[in-house]
């Protein structure tokens, strides 16, 4: 008897079935020679980070993939294509990014600055004589 676990498995014949073949760009546009100066064509075979896409992803034959790779490398050497690109990605905010608003992260020198200002104000005032105090109070 077979268990339920074995029934759920996929047969080897199903795994060997070929998937849908990607259309070959070079054949559909009838391009016989891949030129390193044709930057628009070469960028089709590169990722957003300027990496050469694989043969399965690009849908090219072995010989065409080899020609594309050498053309991309020549174009990079001639500074027609970049070696790498930095892709801006939206990152999640880091924890503690809003420290100014949090009461736990108060500037430890803020009170010293306030104390220094108070000390400066009292030092700049003219000293009051003992006899003057009586006149002010009355």
Image: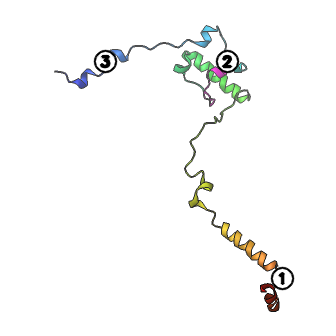
Choose mark 1 or mark 3, whichever is in front: 1
Q: Position of residue 1 (x, y in %)?
A: 16, 21
What is the CA distance from the residue labelled 2 to the residue labelled 3?
Answer: 40 Å
> Callout 3: few (<14), some (14-19), or many (20+) C-alpha neighbours within 10 Å?
few
What is the CA distance from the residue labelled 2 to the residue labelled 1?
Answer: 83 Å
Q: Quadrant of residue 61?
A: top right
- Disc number at residue 11? 3
Marked residue nearer the N-terminal end (1 or 3): 3
In the drawing, does residue 45 fall left or right of residue 10? right
Asked whether residue 50 is drawn in magenta, I would say yes
Asked whether residue 95 is drawn in magenta, I would say no
Please tell me which residue lies in front, 134 or 129: 134
Marked residue nearer the N-terminal end (2 or 1): 2
Residue at left offset 77%, top offset 78%: 122
Figure quadrant of the C terminus? bottom right
In the picture shown, does residue 32 fall above or below 116? above
Helix, strand or loop for disc 3: loop
Q: Quadrant of residue 8?
A: top left
| Residue that carries the numbered disc 2 in the rendered image | 41
Decide whether the magenta segment is chiefly helix, strand or loop. loop
Q: Position of residue 53 (x, y in %)?
A: 57, 24
Residue at left offset 25%, top offset 25%: 5
| Residue that carries the numbered disc 1 in the rendered image | 126
Tell me the magenta residue range.
Answer: 42-51
């Amino acid at each position: 008897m077979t268990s339920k676990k074995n029934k759920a498995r996929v047969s080897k014949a199903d795994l060997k079935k070929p998937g849908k073949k990607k259309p070959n760009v070079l054949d559909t546009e009838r391009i016989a020679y891949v030129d390193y100066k044709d930057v628009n064509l070469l960028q089709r075979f590169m990722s957003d980070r300027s990496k050469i896409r694989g043969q399965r992803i690009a849908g090219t034959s072995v010989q065409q993939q080899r020609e594309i790779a050498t053309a991309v490398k020549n174009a990079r050497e001639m500074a027609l294509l970049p070696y790498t690109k930095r892709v801006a990605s939206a990152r999640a905010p880091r924890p503690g990014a809003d420290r100014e608003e949090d009461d736990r992260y108060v500037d430890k020198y803020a009170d010293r600055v306030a104390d220094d200002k108070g000390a400066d104000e009292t030092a700049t005032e003219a000293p009051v004589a003992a006899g003057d105090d009586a006149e002010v109070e009355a």
